[in-house]
Image: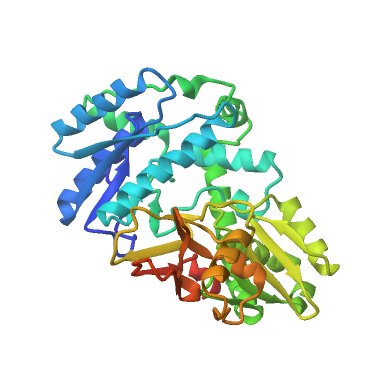
Amino acid sequence: MQLKLDDISDLGQRFCVAVSGGADSLALCLLAQNWAEENGHTLVALSVDHGLRTEAAAECQWVHETLADYGIEHHTLIWTGDKPVRAIQAAAREARYDLMGRWCKAQGIKDLLLAHHQDDQGETFLMRLARGSGVDGLSAMQKVTYRGALRLIRPLLDVPKAALKKYLQDRNQDWIEDPSNQNEAFDRVKMRNAMSSLADVGLTPDRLAQTALSMQRVRKTLEHFCQQWLFEHARLYEEGYVTLTTNALLDENEEIVLRGLSRIGQMVGGDIYPPRLEKLCRLHKTLSSGQDATLMGCRWMVTETEVLVCREIREKDVPENLYDLDCATSLADMEMRVLGEDGWADVLAHASEIDRRGLPMAVIYALVSFWDKQGVSAVPHLGYKRADVIFDAKLRFIPNLDRFS
């Protein structure tokens, strides 16, 4: 068995592989090592100890020792802090991506390989079908996706799980069995267990994965027209907001409109995943009636000629996947957060004549700012810094710009 990565453009000279120690990720890691050696690349394996099971630390150590035998660099990342009591798998997944994304960014690595395989793709398709997903949801997992600047690559989506296990068995390589994979408290496990019965009536993982691939082709076509719609009707601003002509809401191609609204919300609000279809339909109906709305962490404000979309300010945290910060001075004593009304009042107290640069107040309140113990120290998009502050940093808004290409 060989890994297919030649179709991935500009793969980093160093790239990472997520390795839990299970058969899937361990097989991917060893396959990737073979590919890297043949093509002059270097891989680094990353594991995450979520702290949810007592065995996790020992398992990560086993992975470290096993990969050391193959000469593979390996690092274990620790999820610290409070753990959720609900939606545990989803929270753990987000924490895992966040930890690995931060590590990759610190190391200047832009590519992370994930071991999702054909059986996972079939499960994902069925789970999305059960939720009433549209074209995007039924496209299941894409081979290449992005989380901010980190590129996630899934090269095994056409490979059955059984083939990965056989690959390890042929190499006399053991793996770890995660007991949570048998816990029917999790929806994915329930769907996995149901798939054996579905296969008896022809709904095999291969057939499901092929259907997902067909939906991906449909999705790609819709994305083409969606980008045209965005290019014609929407404008993206460096301060992190979007304006959309109200006429765009009346487009007879409702699927394109819904898709465009979702893309705008994701770009401005920073959500990785689109909202449920029914929520998008409700948003479209509300905006078309001339009423304001909130969705995806965004405020949608309607005027006679346009819809202004900016981030909500109820959360102080800034979606880090939306911004790139280049610092020439230390920001160790500063916190990056949304400006808000209190922050704007603090700015005015120190610079009453500050130039608003024509920005709507809703946008100003949602701007990224830097705070210290004395209050607001800097607001880069307003060119503001408090007189006593040494601040030399560039802040760039970096949403997924291919949505507007």
Q: Is residue 365 visible?
A: yes
- In the rendered structure, the answer to whether residue 236 lies left or right of residue 332 reads right
User: Quadrant of the rendered structure where residue 306 is?
Assistant: bottom right
Q: In the rendering, at what x and y percent does residue 318 appear?
A: 51, 55
Toward the viewer: 204 or 240? 240
- In the rendered structure, the answer to whether residue 32 lies left or right of residue 226 reads left
Q: In the rendering, at what x and y percent does residue 339 appear?
A: 55, 61
What residue do we see at 68% from left, 48% from top? 133
Above or below: residue 358 compared with residue 115:
below
What residue do we see at 38% from left, 43% from top? 99
Q: Is residue 146 visible?
A: no
Toward the viewer: 114 or 368? 368
Toward the viewer: 173 or 160? 173
The colour scheme is rainbow
- In the rendered structure, the answer to whether residue 117 lies left or right of residue 267 reads left
What residue do we see at 36% from left, 44% from top? 100
Above or below: residue 200 compared with residue 31:
above
